[in-house]
Amino acid sequence: MSHDFDVCVVGSGAGAGPIIYELCKAGYSVVVLEKGKHFTEKDFFKDEMATSLRSIYTPDLREQQHVVELPHGENGWRSKPTYNSGWDFWNGSLVGGSSNFMSGFFHRLKPVDFRQLSEFGPVEGANIVDWPITYDDLEPYYDKVEKVVGVSGRVIDHPHQEPRISKDFPYPPTQEHPIAKHIDKACDKLGYHAIPMPRAILSHSDKGRTACSYSGYCGSYGCATGAKGSSRAALIDKAVATGNCEIRAESMVSKIKSDAKGKITAVEYYDNQGKQHQLDAKIYVVACQAIETARLLLNSTGPKHKNGLGNNNGQVGKNLLFAGGGAGSGRLTYKSFNEKDALELHQFGTFINRSLQDWYVINDKDFGDRQKGGTIDFVHLHPNPVSRASRQINGEKGLLWGTELKNKIHEHFTGGKYIKIEAFCDWTPTDNTFVSLDSNIKDKWGLASAKVRIDVHVRNLQTGWYLASKGAEVLTAMGAENVVSFAAGAPPTNLVAGGCRFGDDAQTSVLDKNCRSHEVDNLYVTDGSFMPTGGSVPYTWTIYANSFRVADNIINELGGKKEKI
Amino acid sequence: MNLQMDRRNFLVTSAGSMLVATSPFLFSTEGWGSNKTTITHSKKTTGTGLSRRQWKTIVAVQDHLFPSEKNSPGAGDVNAKAFFYAVLSDASRDDEDRKLVKEGLITLQDICWKKYKQTFIELKHELREEALRAFEKTTNGTAWIMTVLGYIFEALLTDPVYGGNPDGAGWKWLGHQPGFPRPTIDKRYFLL
């Protein structure tokens, strides 16, 4: 039977890129249906208006929104459309997805993340499980990401280093800000192990991409040099060059159609003129980021899939994950340092690149039984100036304005260098954080929006507090002033996974261990949806690695790499 | 669910709406910057719904909230009026956004008239301060003032390609280093 393409990929972010890259390289025809536009390096500028104030890389919430559902009263829930709530779950609708805007803080999961239930036992009110694969299964693919996407860093000997087959990173570390040496010194004093943070950023030009230009605007900005290892710059551009890849940007997939046997027959989508099309392929890969992936499957009902594609067990959308954790900050006030150090601290553009993983597993009797902890990253305050100025408006008795406000803003910008703590711990999966559909709130194509119920497990807050306070201890030892730390209860909407768990039990998971639907032979899900637990690091490296792993399986299923004619 | 009402509640309780800018607008500056620039923020514009007198009041409020001083630029130095005009005349914005700005102005004028029998523009500095503090305590007052300040910050600190921040005056004042590459006239956000 002939098909329009060998593989149809819905979405083009980190979960899609490796599939697109590997399948095209193996000689298979791939079509990519991406809702957003196709921007390139030539379209990316350090423009706060575009990235943050007018948010042109995410949909207009009047046309496409979500519904957020939060606890209300004793046992109730209250839902609200995001256009009217201040919430926004979009992270980047464009070719390459939100990987265009990541900071590229790249940490691997550790072996313990793959067996949390076995290692630590159950957590009350939570759905902790072991993964159906081990760290050893994924390690070769973490290694592949280092080489193909490009990860820069420096491996040092420390007690929390996960096993790795390559001795060091293929790219040396990006340039470090002098703050790093203050962190190292403070950690030495405290007996902690500051480690260089790997980055998905090229420290020297390679692979047709230009090295980092150290503009000082990285996270939330598209990279104008191509140094950042976005799915587009690192993988999709290369896939297009094979001649086997067709990108159909501004194509919104509305439904995956299936036949009476339950097998997928076609994908239905709208172009940017609102015209409907459909195409078919041998294999379909969905990778629209966790919430939209669940929504698409739930919206894709069929004769054998009354509750949504691959959802006869009701598991699609369940056990959604964000990232738990804490945060904090402090300021290195220039006048507290000698002239030379103060001058160094003024430096702008280079990276702090320091992390702590001393409490990735917490073994502290004062805190409780041995349990999962997390990672602490030290980062610059985001440089967006309008955002920084806006945060100075509130005074003790009301709004500030006039000379008082101006003085506060001036002092904020010129008095010292701020350091932020970002502490990552597992988002504890529960029955009350999941994606469903809200048929009352539809998007501009008339499709039911995703409703996201969110309930924060107390474990997230406890661990977040613990980690953030450790980070604050380091800031204080560095001589920082105004040090604050806290647990972050609200989910970071840019760090989302889960919703289509992989597992060996077809009743409690959506995907098998190769991320193929238990119910639909020609359907794969390769974004972060597969993760049953999140691990205590940002997700992108793991999503990339797993997608490379699944790509190998799909190539095998299709008959291996095609011979070049 | 009454979506329009919900939107209104959201705007006044969170000041979460940073309105989008548009509209061709010709202006010039002196002092902190020397650019003569035409602000063009979008392809389609509409009326702001505000009278000439109301725009004069907005300028007076902007000057009070963010005054021009010897060592620092104020709202008038960074084209804050033109910037706000461009924001409100963007045809793609909800009418509700324009309406809320207008209603805030009416409330402020009511306070001024009831307390002093004068308009905001006619008040001396101390009474303007008193009137704005009274306005801040009204239902929508805080959100309204935050909105006006928010767009002053945009005029002060976004790239000069958008018509504010002439010659980088805001950046220079704060020792702020912009990133590169900076947006060009043909790659402003509404043209991408």
Image (spheres, coloured by chain):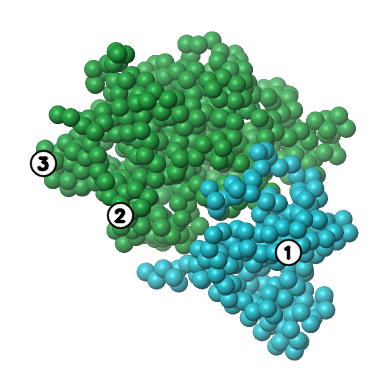
Judging by the rendered image, the residue that carries numbered circle 3 is A260
Q: Amino acid at mark 1?
A: Phe
Find residue B100 and report its image quarter. Answer: bottom right
Q: CA distance from mark 1 to mark 3?
A: 66 Å
Q: Nearer the viewer, residue A562 or A213?
A: A562
Rendering coords of residue B1 (x, y %): 37, 69
Left or right of A564, for residue A344: right
The residue drawn where x is 64% and y is 24% is A174
Protein chain holding label 1? B
Judging by the rendered image, the residue that carries numbered circle 1 is B27
The chain assigned the colour cyan in the figure is B
Rendering coords of residue A171 (x, y %): 58, 17
Left or right of A60, for residue A131: left
Camera-nearest label, 1 or 2: 1
Q: Amino acid at mark 2?
A: Leu
Q: Nearer the viewer, residue A289 or A352?
A: A289
- What label does residue A315 carry, if any? none
Q: Earlier in the sequence, mark 3 or mark 2?
A: 3
Screen quadrant of the N terminus of chain A: top left
State whether residue A555 appears in this view. yes
Look at the image and give the colour of chain A: green
Residues flagged by tags 1 and 2 on a common chain: no
Picture layout, residue B168 above or below residue A510 = below
Judging by the rendered image, the residue that carries numbered circle 2 is A447
The residue drawn where x is 44% and y is 38% is A95
Find residue B142 and report its image quarter. Answer: bottom right
State whether residue A118 appears in this view. no
Q: What SS does tag 2 mark? A: loop
Q: Amino acid at mark 3?
A: Ala
